[in-house]
Image: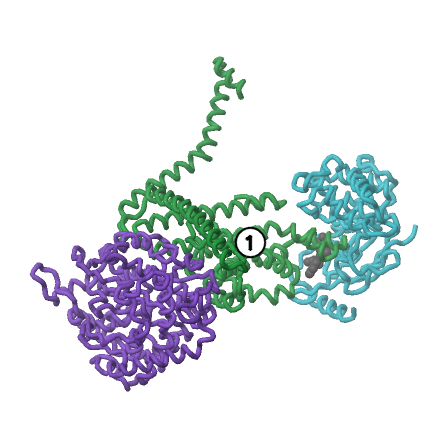
Chain colours: A green, B purple, C cyan
């Protein structure tokens, strides 16, 4: 290209159009990949701030982009402050343990986790952890189950009605039952993870389960007959058949199911956290709503944007994983 | 005071009998806590302050307790949390441990070794209702309404709504909440019937024969529910009355201080099982809470601004500083601009506020009986036995005594533990002037013009 | 020459929602070691069904197939199949597709086992045979249709089957590619002298490649109408043959069979009595 440019500068009339063309092409590329989204976002921010100025709530004016940005910075500052408090907490604990050892030599000192409030960042992390673990548990159940259902007509026929009935049920409807069952079943004196975490996690699992089972089963059942025949001619043992033929062939459908369920799971988790007051971004939103302070709406908007961004990144992440794992690159587009 | 004495001797007897498991008398060294990691629940209300302060000021840590403080969605979730062990203890409505112990609602033996505060609630009506009520209220020379405002002023409004066939709805926070009883007391004192409960017939809506229909809304959602027009008014704790003023959506008409001067309000509730299993932990919790209460009222409320700052953190009450400060620093704003001094609106320690008086328990039980939550006649003895089972001045006294012994509190601020029988002298400062004597609950119930009579059942 | 495969009185009835459907009846065929036999007939007459029964993918409802003196019960690598749609595993490269077969057939302990290096050589040898050594490490979607079919053949050959079953292997290819493939196949046949059953509906292909052409009647209840010997000398050259009188005579014989005797008439109402027969046959079996 350099040569083209320098030639063009030498006023070669023939080459000029080519040079212009190159610039034009880059220009179009710039417009479509950078300028387009930037213009879109700018327009959105503008509309948002104009609309915000015209909405009066009982908690004051609706927060505009700059208010939300202020709150984002506040939340970050709070996070840092809380970490400092945590450090002080650990130090005090250390001293207290030492002091107790002086009078009570039998005492086995123990470091307890910081008891202070969960910051916005902690809540983000909690939600992410919950959604990922619930999702993985669901995948561990759903994919083998889906494969079994997809392979066996008999199993399909016996399980299908159950799946069809449970699939349309909002996992939020399960929430009370999950809560009660976890409370009843999960009784340990020194719990490794909290009950509320398990409740949220199982809600996510329930939510992910059905789309994954259905998609996996459909993927498995719709494998090209010829490929199955290849396996038969080769007399592949059952396990090898699954490993070499079934699993790779249904990977695109399995991923479709996984992406679908992760998207829904993220939405449902936020709602479940709001409803059950389980730690996470949903609880953050609900707490702020209940606080009803003049900063609350700005903080809620910050949380909404965060939730959206994370949802987007989760989807991209799944897509990337699919690109990486799946042979069928065309199924991983969009 | 005959009953009081009986109860006292009973208490001493029980104490003596249970000596082997319980901690020894004062003077004996208080042991290390059996359970150190604790989770306490609260509802976003300013009267949770003792818990927040005990945490923030390090009083819990001083006792070797590592406490996590968690806001709860509503009173039911909170109570269930304590019952099923998710929470070790919580900021509770005074009625909750009593109701749970007698089995109205979820049955469980909950006790309270510590009263959290006096007063602190208010009744707010929507702007629309206030406009109509105002016409019925006499004015002072400066044009402002004469206080206390009685429900007499509301009565014509309710009657108008009734004649138009519109139900008159008001919100309170929980069936056994102080707010329910205070709102009912105020309405009934003004000739408005708040409705009976009939749990035996399966009716726990509390709206039988009601002029005003009361329903449950969690405290932080009160302003939003009022704004939405679902209810015309509510009774709730702070800051949710002041919030209505700030938002310009309603007007507080009366504080509970004016309904019953220095009424006992929230308590700290734990299960009886917890207290038995972890006696040292229990005493240490109470010690930390007493110190927090002292701090809150110290030097004539000098620490209140700092307390407000702590409460306005998003993990505690979370409302704006100004909103919380409005009631916590000795004032209360009624109609916008009508800010009056109510120095005792929030009492955390003065007037023996933290001592769990049996007579306080009896008052709540009488109100439960009055409105049918306790469906049948009970003997005076029964009231005293329940009070004795739930309210635990024995634990309180040990905690307070050990603080006194260590010089962390002064003896003069507490009742004389040797002679205190747990019954306050008859109290007369109610809005309707009816005198309450905790030793004679049935006689008290008989005095109300509106409400079930002592032997009446639905 | 000795008999390798014997199809005796084979019948096939498919249960369908509308009742039993008799696809094949009384199919009898004997194939010698090293013979190249093609099956020709109108679409839907039952050629694939015959092949699938031989492969063991279908179970005949009556009669059966004997290979090397043993009855065929289930599919196996001794009867390698080349499918019409290549049926390569799309997530594996050409090499890996062949490798899957080779590993499955030769990794067992026994007389046929191969070491790792032997296997590698064998895979490459087979791919070379079909002229695919240059694109061994490409995935199916990176190569042309003809190349895919070549890999499919390599995979089948790599199993060292007793018989090679090909179901319209070149049906989906354009004419030029098809000619190339036919030449390649003849070349391989020259070298390996495999026993082959190939389904086709291309008359030229049948005459060019086969030792015998088995012509099937139209279904339902299709069977073998006639068998035509192709005594043309090998190696065969397509250009030379096009001017060869015998070739053209054979060609017109097949055409006559297909377009005079077995003209395809679309019959909308399937004959009910045949179905009843099929049902009886079913019970008998
Ligand atoms: N699995 C099956 N179930 C029902 N009918 C089938 C099945 N397979 C083939 N058929 C029917 O048998 C007949 C022969 O089919 P096929 O052997 O595929 O024909 P060809 O290969 O000659 O085109 C067709 O009418 C087809 O519809
Ligand atoms: Mg066919």
Q: Residue furthest left?
A: B141
Q: Nearer the viewer, residue A153 or A313?
A: A313
Query: The N terminus of chain B lies in which quarter of the figure?
Result: bottom left
Q: Nearer the viewer, residue B89 or C151?
A: B89
Residue B332 found in image quarter: bottom left
Is C261 left or right of A116, judged from the image as shown?
A: right
Q: Is residue B287 above or below residue C97?
A: below
Q: Secondary structure at mark 1?
A: helix
**Residue located beneath label 1 in the image:** A257
Q: Residue furthest right?
A: C1
Q: Is residue B81 visible?
A: no
Q: Is residue B162 visible?
A: yes
Image location (x, y in percent) of residue A307: 43, 49
Q: Is residue C71 above or below residue A247?
A: below
Chain to which mark 1 belongs: A
Q: Ligand 1: which quarter?
A: bottom right
Is A250 left or right of B228, judged from the image as shown?
A: right
Residue C3 found in image quarter: bottom right
Image location (x, y in percent) of residue A151: 66, 59
Query: The C terminus of chain B lies in which quarter of the figure?
Result: bottom left
Q: Is residue B383 above or below residue B243?
A: below
């Amino acid at each position: 290209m350099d040569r083209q440019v320098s030639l063009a500068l030498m006023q070669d009339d023939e080459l000029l159009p080519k040079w212009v063309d190159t610039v034009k092409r880059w220009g179009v590329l710039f417009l479509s990949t950078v300028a387009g989204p930037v213009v879109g976002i700018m327009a959105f921010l503008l509309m948002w701030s104009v609309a915000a100025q015209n909405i009066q709530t009982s908690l004051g004016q609706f927060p505009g982009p700059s208010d939300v940005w202020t709150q984002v910075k506040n939340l970050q500052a709070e996070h840092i402050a809380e970490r400092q408090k945590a450090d002080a907490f650990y130090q005090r604990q250390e001293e207290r343990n030492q002091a107790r050892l002086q009078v009570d030599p039998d005492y086995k000192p123990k470091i307890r986790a910081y008891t202070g409030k969960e910051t916005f960042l902690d809540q983000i992390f909690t939600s992410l952890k919950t959604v990922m673990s619930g999702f993985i548990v669901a995948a561990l159940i759903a994919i083998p189950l889906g494969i079994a259902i997809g392979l066996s007509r008999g199993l399909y026929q016996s399980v299908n009605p159950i799946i069809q009935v449970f699939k349309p049920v909002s996992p939020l409807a399960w929430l009370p039952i999950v809560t009660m069952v976890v409370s009843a079943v999960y009784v340990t004196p020194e719990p490794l993870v909290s009950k509320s975490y398990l409740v949220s996690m199982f809600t996510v699992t329930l939510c992910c389960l059905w789309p994954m089972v259905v998609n996996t089963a459909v993927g498995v059942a719709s494998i090209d007959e010829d490929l199955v025949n290849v396996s038969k001619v080769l007399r592949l043992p059952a396990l090898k058949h699954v490993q070499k033929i079934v699993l790779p062939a249904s990977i695109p459908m399995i991923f479709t199911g996984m992406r679908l369920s992760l998207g829904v799971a993220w939405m449902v988790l936020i709602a479940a956290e709001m409803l059950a007051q389980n730690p996470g971004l949903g609880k953050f939103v609900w707490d702020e709503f209940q606080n009803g302070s003049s900063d609350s709406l700005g903080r809620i908007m910050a949380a909404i944007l965060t939730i959206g961004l994370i949802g987007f990144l989760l989807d991209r992440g799944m897509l990337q994983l699919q690109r990486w794992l799946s042979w069928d690159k065309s199924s991983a587009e969009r | 005071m005959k009953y009081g004495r009986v109860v006292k001797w009973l208490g001493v007897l029980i104490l003596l009998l249970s000596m082997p498991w319980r901690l020894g008398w004062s003077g004996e060294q208080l042991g290390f806590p059996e359970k150190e990691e604790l989770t306490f629940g609260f509802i976003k209300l300013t009267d949770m302050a003792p818990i927040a302060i005990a945490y923030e000021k390090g009083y819990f840590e001083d006792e070797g307790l590592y406490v996590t403080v968690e806001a709860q969605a509503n009173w039911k979730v909170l109570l269930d949390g304590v019952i099923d062990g998710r929470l070790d203890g919580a900021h509770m409505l005074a009625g909750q441990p009593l109701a749970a112990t007698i089995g109205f609602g979820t049955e469980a033996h909950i006790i309270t070794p510590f009263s959290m505060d006096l007063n602190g609630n208010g009744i707010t009506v929507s702007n629309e209702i206030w406009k109509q009520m105002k016409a019925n209220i006499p004015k002072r020379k400066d044009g402002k309404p004469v206080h206390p405002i009685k429900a007499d002023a509301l009565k014509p409004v309710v009657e108008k709504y009734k004649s138009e066939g519109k139900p008159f709805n008001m919100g309170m926070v929980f069936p056994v909440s102080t707010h329910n009883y205070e709102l009912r007391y105020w309405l009934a004192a003004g000739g408005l019937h708040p409705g009976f409960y009939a749990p035996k017939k399966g009716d726990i809506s509390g709206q039988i024969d009601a002029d005003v229909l009361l329903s449950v809304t969690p405290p932080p959602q009160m302003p939003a529910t009022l704004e939405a027009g679902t209810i015309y008014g509510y009774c709730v704790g702070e800051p949710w009355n002041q919030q209505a003023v700030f938002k310009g959506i309603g007007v507080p008409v009366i504080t509970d201080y004016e309904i019953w001067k220095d009424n006992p309000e929230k308590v700290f509730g734990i299960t009886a099982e917890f207290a038995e299993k972890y006696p040292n932990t229990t005493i240490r919790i109470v010690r930390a809470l007493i110190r927090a209460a002292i701090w809150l009222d110290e030097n004539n409320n000098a620490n209140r601004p700092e307390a407000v700052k702590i409460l306005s953190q998003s993990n505690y009450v979370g409302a704006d500083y100004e909103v919380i400060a409005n009631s916590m620093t000795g004032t209360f704003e009624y109609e916008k601009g009508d800010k009056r001094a109510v120095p005792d609106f929030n009492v955390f320690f003065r007037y023996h506020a933290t001592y769990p008086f049996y007579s306080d328990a009896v008052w709540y039980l009488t109100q439960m009986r009055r409105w049918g939550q306790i469906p049948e006649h009970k003997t005076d003895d029964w009231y005293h036995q329940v009070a004795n089972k739930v309210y635990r001045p024995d634990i309180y006294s040990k905690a307070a005594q050990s603080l006194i012994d260590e010089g962390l509190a002064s003896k003069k601020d507490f009742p004389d533990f040797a002679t205190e029988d747990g019954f306050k002298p008859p109290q007369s400062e109610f809005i309707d002037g009816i005198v309450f004597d905790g030793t004679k609950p049935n006689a008290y119930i008989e005095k109300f013009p509106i409400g079930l009579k002592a032997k009446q059942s639905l | 020459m000795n008999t390798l495969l014997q199809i005796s009185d084979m019948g096939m009835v498919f249960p369908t929602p509308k009742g039993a459907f008799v696809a094949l009846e009384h199919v009898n065929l004997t194939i010698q070691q090293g013979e190249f036999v093609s099956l020709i007939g109108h679409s839907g007459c039952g050629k694939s069904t015959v092949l699938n029964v031989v492969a063991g993918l279908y179970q005949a409802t009556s009669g059966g197939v004997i290979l090397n003196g043993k009855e065929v019960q289930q599919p196996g690598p001794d009867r390698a199949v080349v499918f019409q749609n290549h049926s390569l595993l799309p997530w594996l490269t050409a090499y890996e597709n062949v490798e899957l077969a080779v590993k499955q057939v030769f990794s067992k302990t026994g007389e046929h086992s191969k070491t790792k290096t032997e296997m590698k050589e064998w895979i490459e040898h087979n791919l070379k045979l079909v002229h695919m050594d240059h694109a061994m490490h490409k995935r199916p979607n990176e190569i042309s249709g003809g190349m895919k079919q070549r890999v499919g053949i390599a995979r089948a050959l790599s199993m060292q089957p007793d018989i090679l079953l090909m179901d319209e292997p070149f049906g989906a290819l354009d004419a030029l590619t098809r000619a190339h493939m036919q030449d390649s196949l003849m070349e391989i046949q020259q070298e390996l002298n495999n026993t082959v059953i190939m389904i086709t509906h291309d008359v030229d292909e049948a005459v060019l490649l086969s030792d015998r052409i088995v012509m099937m009647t139209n279904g339902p209840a299709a069977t073998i109408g006639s068998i035509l010997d192709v005594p043309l000398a090998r190696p065969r050259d397509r250009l030379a043959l096009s001017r060869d009188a015998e070739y053209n005579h054979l060609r017109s014989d097949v055409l006559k069979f297909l377009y005079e005797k077995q003209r395809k008439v679309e019959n909308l109402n399937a004959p009910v009595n045949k179905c009843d027969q099929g049902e009886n046959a079913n019970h008998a079996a």
